[in-house]
Amino acid sequence: METKLERISDKSAHMPMPEFTSLFHLIDAEMLKQCHKELDGNKAVGIDEVTKEEYGRNLDTKVTDLVERLKRKAYKPQPAMRVYIPKDNGKLRPLAIACYEDKIVQMALKKILEAIYEPRFLENMYGFRPGRGCHDAIKVVHRKLNNDRICYVVDADIKGFFDHMNHDWLVKFLELYIKDPNIIWLVKKFLKAGVMDEGELQATDEGSAQGSIVSPILANIYMHNVLMLWYKVIIAKRCKGDNFLANYADDFIAGFQYKWEAEEYYQLLKARMNKFGLELEESKSHMVMMGRYIANARVKSGENTKFGTFDFLGFSFYCGKSKTGKPWIMPKTSGKKFRKKVKAMKEWLYRHRDTPLKLIMKTVNMKLVGHYRYYGVSFNSRWIANFWFQTRELLFKILNRRSNRRSYTRAEFVEMLKYYPLATPKVFVSLFQ
């Protein structure tokens, strides 16, 4: 199976306009069993409540039946179960949980689509891609703002990107390379499967529900065609000065040397999004003066270098000073994310205040290390240390509410931390590598 997918990737990488006419046969018993093996059995179940363990009983029989249904076009994915998780702004983000058998087929489809599109995606795309992550996107933004002649940044936000991808356009994008109608049929089946929301079946006439296995690659294909190629072929060629675009899923940042180019890009971007059924969130989209190049120029002319800031992937970028006192664009934990993380820690501690101390400290340290691994980047030592401090103070308050009388004086609390020390803040990611 891997050899076949590798051949597809090689063809996609080395042909200007590859065409794949025979792909559906790859979704055979061998691939489906491999997908079953790779799936996480601890994930939430769909509306049929079938777990990985249950599906694994008589696996050969079930997979054989599934392959036959796929061949006869009798396979029909069940509606996904919709659940909601809180967002930073207080609203709820809808997620879709597919049934286990549908997860298996989605993973097989994902493997095929990734084999075709991974070699074709541009280097400045970082979301949901093998070997790439948030820190790679943060590094490139940091490098561009400090090393290139960037003076203006456009921070744009798409309103409900995953929910509003146009199905017709998505199919057209897929058909550029995929000439196998059976694969297109399968994609359409998942797009139109619907969702169960509080017992009510809702049609899915647009979008690809977040939470499904195949949704990230479909979103990347949509963004690749709507934004990334358009920027490379149209916008970048128009620009006279330095410019860049960095994308992670539906988040993206563009930088320009000249103000008029940034303004023109923003106006063209709105029209481009509208053409493909998307809309910019005007209240969250803005242009800000930003970049070491313009900061140095303002220092030389005696002007203020206190610019605005913009947020990207949980970090706020601002103009600070290097060790030598020169302007430098740096990231720090965004205030919104910091408050959310502190609130989450507080709520967890209150819910588990009666848990044995040893277990509390073990979990708190796991949470701290997880926080450091993401937010522990160059220049952000102060903010991860602040998170450590806030956690320590919350812990002291919570432990003193475990009984009617105070459990610890401050001195006793400090003594306890010698036996159960809190994980020390640490920078895990260097932005200079």
Image: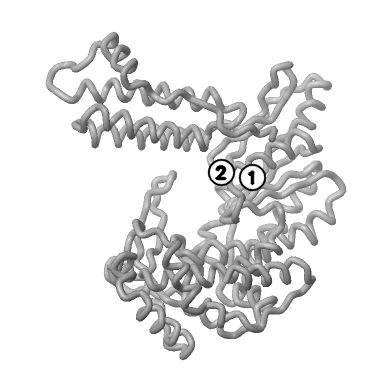
Q: Which quadrant of the rendered structure holds the N terminus? A: bottom right
Q: Is residue 271 among what the camera can see? A: no
Pick the residue in front: 404 or 226.
Answer: 404
Q: Is 192 above or below relative to 380?
A: below
Colour convention of the picture: one colour
Label 2 near label 1: C-beta < 8 Å? yes
Q: Is residue 245 among what the camera can see? A: yes
Q: Is 423 above or below relative to 153?
A: above
Residue in view at x 58 percent, y 35 percent = 316
Residue in view at x 49 percent, y 27 percent = 384
Which disc number belongs to residue 26? none
Q: Amino acid at mark 1?
A: Ala
| Residue 16 shown left or right of residue 352 in the figure | right
Which residue does the numbered mark 2 point to in the structure image? 313
The residue sitting at the right extreme is: 240
Pick the residue in front: 267 or 313.
Answer: 313
Percent across and percent down for residue 358 are: 26, 28
Callout 2 secondary element: loop
Which residue does the numbered mark 1 point to in the structure image? 137
Q: Which quadrant of the rendered structure holds the C terminus? A: top right
| Residue 97 shown left or right of residue 144 in the figure | left
Please tell me how crowded label 1 is: few (under 14), some (14-19), or many (20+) other residues with Cα within 10 Å.
Answer: many
Callout 1 secondary element: helix
The residue sitting at the top extreme is: 411
